[in-house]
Image (cartoon, rainbow, N blue to C red):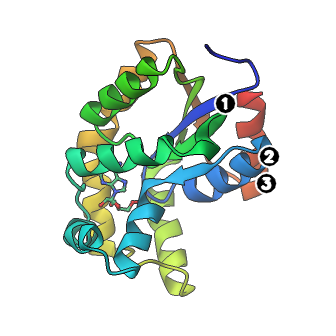
Amino acid sequence: MLNEYEFRIVLLGAPGVGKGSQAERLSESLKIPHISTGVIMRKAISDGTALGKEMKKYIDDGVLVPDSLVISLVKERLGQPDCCCGFLLDGFPRTIEQAEALDKMLGEIGAPLSHVVDLSVPEEVLYERMKTRAASGAGRSDDTVEVFSRRLEVYKLQTAPLKDYYASKGMLKELSGLGAIEEVGKRLLEAIV
Ligand code: AMP
C-alpha cells in the first residue's frame, strides 16, 4: 500500500541533463537509496565481473544494454532491504519494456511508483554540459561528442516515449533543468513533497 511517507520515484531526462547530481541530492534529502543503473554497471565493469564485461561493449558504444540484463539487475537491487521504504531510480527505466517490467515488479508487491519527474533542457545545453564535463576531467569514457550524440539519439528513440507512457497514467511531472544545481534541486524537491 502506498504510504504517504514512502517515495518511489523515477527521474527521467536526456543524458547530460543533470539527473545524476539531482538524484544524489534528492535521495539524501528524502533519505531513500539512489539507484542509478549506470553507476551499478560502471561498478560491475571496474570490478571486472563477467556481467560487467558483457555490458561494457554497449556502454562504450553509447547504446542501451539489453532489457533482460537491466531488468534483472534492477529487480535484484529493489529486493534489497534498504529499498523497503522507498527509492529513487535514475537512468531506469529507459525503454517501454523496462517501464512495464517495473510496473509489474512493483505491482506484485503492492508498492507502485509515487512520482515520475522529467527534467529537460534545450539540446545545445546538453552538449555544452557534456563538453564542460569532458574538459574538466570529470567526464566519463562515454563523454565524447561521438558517443554522446549516439546516446542522445538513443534517448530520443527509445527513452523519450516514456514521457507519454507515464503522462497517459497521469503521473508525469515535467520540470526545467536549467539553472544552478541548487536552483534545480529546489524546484525538484518542491515538485515532489
Ligand atoms: P547513465 O550513467 O545513466 O548515463 O548510463 C550510461 C550507459 O549505461 C548508457 O548509455 C547505457 O549504455 C547504459 N545504461 C544505463 N542504464 C540503462 C538502462 N536502464 N537500460 C539500458 N542501458 C542502460
Which disc, if any, is residue 29?
2
Question: Callout 3: few (<14), some (14-19), or many (20+) C-alpha neighbours within 10 Å?
Answer: few
Q: In the rendering, at what x and y percent does residue 120 appear?
A: 52, 43
Tag nearer the camera, 2 or 3: 2
Q: Secondary structure at mark 3?
A: helix
Above or below residue 58? Residue 174 is above
Identify which residue, 181 or 85, lies in the foreground.
85
Rendering coords of residue 107 (x, y %): 43, 18
Residue 141 at least partly seen = no
Place residue 61 in its image quadrant. Answer: bottom left
Please tell me in which quarter of the rendered image ligand 1 is found: bottom left
Residue in the image at 67% along x and 33% along y: 85
Rendered residue at 71%/47% (across/down): 26
**Reading the chain from its start, which is encountered first: label 2 or label 1?**
1
Q: Which mark is residue 182?
A: 3
- Which quadrant of the figure has residue 158? top left
| Residue type indicated by callout 1 | Phe
On-image quarter of the C terminus: top right
Q: Amino acid at mark 3?
A: Glu
Residue that badge 1 annotates: 7
Give the residue displayed 39% in from the left and 27% down from the top.
105
Helix, strand or loop at label 1? It is strand
- Give the amino acid at mark 2: Ser
Q: Please tell me which of labels 2 and 3 falls first in the chain.
A: 2
- Marks 3 and 2: in contact by CB < 8 Å? no
- Distance between the Cα atoms at labels 1 and 3? 21 Å
